[in-house]
Amino acid sequence: MAILVMHPDQEFVGEVRGVDLRNPLEKDNFSKIHEALDRCAVLVFRDQNLTDEQQIAFSQHFGPLETSIGTIRKDRKLRLPSAALADISNLDENNNLRSTSDRWRMMMLANQLWHTDSSFKRVPGKISFLSAHEVPPSGGETEFADLRAAYDSLEQVTKEQIEDLVAEHSIFFSRSLVGYTDFSDEERAALPPVPQTIVRTHPGSGRRTLYLASHASHIIGWPKPQGRALLDELMTFATQPRFVYQHRWRAGDLVVWDNRCTLHRGRPYDDANLRRDMRRTTVEDSAPTLAHSRLLKATRL
């Protein structure tokens, strides 16, 4: 039976015990996990050692899976067998360490920026599942920030200022922050910039939350320098240590998080010499954030 153990310092993080995700998930256990995720936003499952098929099967309980952007570029050789798996590793298609000049390695450096998965897509990521197959002995942690708690802590004047603002999100912008611009025509056509609301209501908890990411380039309708400054200010506020949990990985871990109310980032490690094999599946949201916002406002009328 699934049991939720809350983190002693961060109320948005919990560890789920008493469940083996390699086996078919019982309805009662799924209900408990789903309720725990709405409450916490980040759930840790230790000692799971999932196969790719088992990870995909568990993820699909929460909705349809998005296709990894790594599959868009046809000249890229893939290491993982399924388009639903995002390869969050420093390994090439032959399972060897990537060179320091490798294109995909440079692309992945932007994962060290605070972000929420797939906010650069018209329908963004909802819930992500990251499974650890190999981890380095030091470094490579993942940090998470609680955007519901951050929103609650904003001054009222700021809440009113940002209530109806919309930001443009683009993977081309976030990658440019680390100096990466080597996108193919296929990638540029498949991933155009998209608008996303800055404030959302989290469906599962009913709480208001910020919705931020390094993918957010500017605020639509504002002068770009002014909008950029506000986004930077909100990101700095939301990622203060009081809102952040750092996960230290062990092989076999599965960490699940709600992209609608958290930020996350990977931490550096010696990726030129140490192997790190992580595999992510992501459930896509039900609609663009603007559609969610319009529906919510209509129900309040």
Image (tube, grey):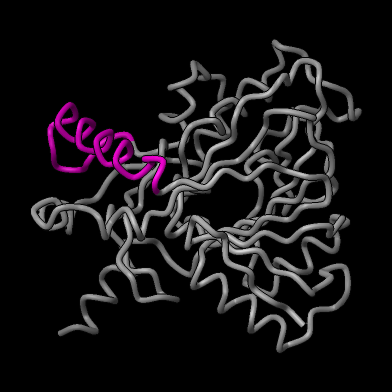
x, y percentage for residue 7?
A: 57, 60
Q: Which residues are magenta?
A: 217-242
**Residue 232 falls inside the magenta stretch:** yes
Residue with the most extreme front position: 8
| Secondary structure, magenta segment, majority class | helix
Locate residue 44, reporting x and y percent.
Answer: 67, 59
The percent coordinates of residue 61 (x first, y second) are 69, 75
Viewer-side residue, 104 vs 241: 241
Residue at the spot 8% in from the left edge and 53% down from the top edge: 157
Decide if residue 57 is on the left or right side of residue 139: right
**Percent position (x, y) of residue 200?**
31, 63
Which of the image's four quarters has the N terminus? bottom right
Say whether residue 255 is magenta.
Answer: no
Identified at 79% across, 68% down, the residue is 57
Q: Nearer the viewer, residue 26 or 4?
A: 4
User: Which residue is at the far bottom?
Assistant: 28
